[in-house]
Image: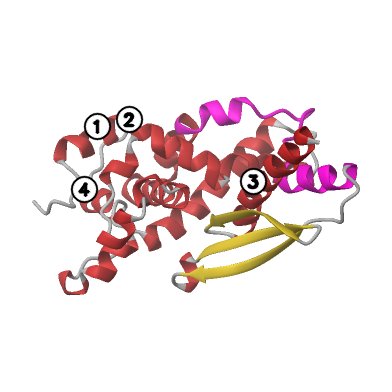
Amino acid sequence: MNRNEPSPKGVERLEQALDITFQDKRLLALALVHGSYVNEHPNEGIESNERLEFLGDAVLDVIVGEAVYRWFPAAPEGQLTVLRAAVVRDECLARVSSKLGVGALLMFGQGEEATGGRARPSNLAAALEALIGAAFLDQGYAVARKMVLHLLADEMSMLSAERVPVDAKSQLQGLAQQQGRPGPVYRVVHEQGPEHAKEFEVEVVVDGEVLGTGRGRRKAEAEREAAVQAIAALNGARSRE
């Protein structure tokens, strides 16, 4: 066994946690291959999990979108969008993925491994989406739906039509206004990866000062992460005054 390969016992425990036994184990194995491993081992003929991630992202949106549509029959479209986004954001998916122990099972290249790739939220979130895509291909929508609702039950239980989650970007906008500062400006400082699986690095500037930097597979995710850092910076500055 390649030392980078996940152990059979680890994979078995993951299936138990997902409450699914894959009929095609190759799909499960594929979901755990990070692009960095493929880049460093081009002669092995191994595909990365990026295509499964793409599929899983779409399946996840449908499952969570259907759930919030049914759970909140009076909510308008805009509110449903916010409710869905609160569940499918990278931060939430990475937290679930971490609880499942997915990071320890991923196959990375040495470079990504050395820079903390196993704990990187974008990698963990992407792997969870790849697992959802794999489950969908292996056993269909009904099984994938059951798995997703089980995994995200805690996150979805916190949703409320009366208390729509406030996005970090909105919080930062309000905090800047309260402190008499100009509105935050977000700018992409780096992007990498193929077109369908890019990772963005974004920084947020408030009153001419870079207060936060975020990374994510979507610009919006990277902006939210940067906003969280900026909120902490502004609150810290205020407490020192």
The CA span between labels 3 and 2 is 32 Å
Between disc 4 and disc 1, the foreground one is 1
Judging by the rendered image, the residue that carries numbered circle 3 is 229
The CA span between labels 4 and 1 is 14 Å
Judging by the rendered image, the residue that carries numbered circle 2 is 17
Q: Are the two marked residues, 3 and 2, in contact with CB atoms closer than 8 angstroms?
A: no
Magenta residue span: 151-178
SS at circle 4: helix
Judging by the rendered image, the residue that carries numbered circle 4 is 25
SS at circle 1: helix
Q: Are the two marked residues, 1 and 2, in contact with CB atoms closer than 8 angstroms?
A: yes
Residue at x-position 18% and y-position 50%: 5
Q: Is residue 111 magenta?
A: no
The CA span between labels 1 and 2 is 6 Å
Residue at x-position 21% and y-position 48%: 25
- Which label belongs to residue 99? none
Please tell me which residue lies in front, 88 or 107: 107
Q: Earlier in the sequence, mark 4 or mark 3?
A: 4
Judging by the rendered image, the residue that carries numbered circle 1 is 13
Residue at x-position 51% and y-position 33%: 152
Q: Are the two marked residues, 4 and 2, in contact with CB atoms closer than 8 angstroms?
A: no
**Residue 225 in picture, x, y percent from top left:** 61, 49
The CA span between labels 4 and 3 is 40 Å
Residue 222 sits in quarter: bottom right
